[in-house]
Image (cartoon, rainbow, N blue to C red):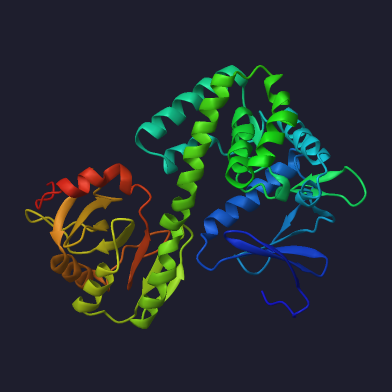
Amino acid sequence: MEFDGTQKFIGKGAQAEVVLYHGYAYKIYQQFYPTQWILSEVRNQEKLNKGGYTPVKFYDTDDKRIIKMDYVEGEPLEVRAKNGDLKAFDILADAFKTIHEKPCRDIPYDRLNGDISFMLKGEEKELAYKFEGIFTKKYGECICHRDLHFLNIMAAPGSDDYTVIDWVNARKTPFIFDYARTYVIFDEFSKEGLEIYKQRVLPQMWAQGVTEEDFEMAVKVCLALRKAEKTFGQKIFGYKKDLMPKLEEMGFTLSEMWRDEIRVYSDTVPSKETIKKILSLLTCEQELQFWDKFYGKQGREISRYVDVIVMGDYVAYHFSGHGWSSGYYRMSIDEMADLIVKSWEYGANLSDYSFKNFILIGANQTSDWYMDDYLKAGYEPAT
């Protein structure tokens, strides 16, 4: 999509900027932001529209990284708050109440435990799972915005009417986590605002039977999640920013697949040294996948997917798809590069893609889970 130069800059967040163009707002994501996440945001917005949570509708564009949306007139509630209008906190409280009171039983929405699963580990994950379950039984669940602050509430000119925007972090979870998340945000950015939040907003939550002990645990969970979020995005898509230009310099044609892997294509077989150079650019935070035409043992020839994790001076790999293996095995960088080169021109007749003349590189979202398997990988694959 191309703009004609009349667009007006509205604002910028961590991953996107927003412009006003011909009466609509356009959210323009960074080049390396996963398109699957953008598609998920669009689909979730449709659910929120149907549930009456927001009147702001999204529209398709011819660019998968740009979302066209209804433009909301007004100004961020932060403007009033900075001018000392304490009624801004009353509007914030009303926003919580209005969102949480809407019935959500029939809305198939992502739950918070999905974020807990991918973003946390160890004791933090166990604690978050535990209290997410306890609070669900105790307080029920509802759609929670999970980023409800003054910048995400647009106040209508000359009135107390408002529209809540930016629902990208919304999840189905107990309402206590919504209040706790905003508590964490105030604590991070405005100690003065936090004190007023405690006085003018939290009494509404206490009136619903929330105990101080429960809220303390909810804040602890939200703190852990917020900390993880600041590194999670970099792990999932940040590596592309440095990697993709280097791959293009090597002469590969690049495109992104629907799961946001990089498709690294060449119609001529790359050299072994080139593949070794690619492997040298990767860490255990990424995963390379190719179709091994030649794998065989004891006289058998079995073609299968191979997932490759680079562990410094060796790779850990396992087979997936047909011929799946549960464990990880070890191979030298040199041996793996040789195998990828030999398999380059071969591919399976698959519905998604054939793997002929290309490999895939994507984020290794489970690196924390399987690190011990990578480190303990032996040289002999299973029969």
Residue 42 visible, this orientation: yes
Residue found at x 71% / y 50%? 151
Check the image and name the residue furthest to the left: 298
- For the N terminus, give its image quadrant: bottom right
Give the image location of residue 85, x and y in percent.
Answer: 83, 43
Res 327 visible: no
User: Percent x, y for residue 126?
Assistant: 39, 29
Between 28 and 63, the residue placed more toward the observer is 28
Name the foreground residue: 347 vs 335.
Answer: 335
Q: Judge from the rendering whether residue 227 lies leftward or rightward of residue 68; answer left or right.
A: left
Q: As drawn, is 367 to the left or to the right of 59? A: left
Say if 91 sits above or below 303 in the image.
above
Image vertical order of residue 287 relative to residue 63, above or below: above
Residue 150, image x and y in percent? 73, 46
Kindly give the residue lying farthest to the right in the view shown: 158
Horizontally, is 184 left or right of 376 in the view? right
126 versus 26 height, above or below? above
Q: Residue at x 44, y 52 (%)?
A: 231
Establish if 117 lies above or below 83: above
Residue 49 lies left or right of residue 348; in this view the side is right
Q: Residue 374 placed where, x, y %?
A: 21, 49
Give me the residue at 55% from left, 36% from top: 111
Q: Nearer the viewer, residue 107 or 211?
A: 211
Total residue callouts: 0
Name the residue at 58% across, 17% down. 138
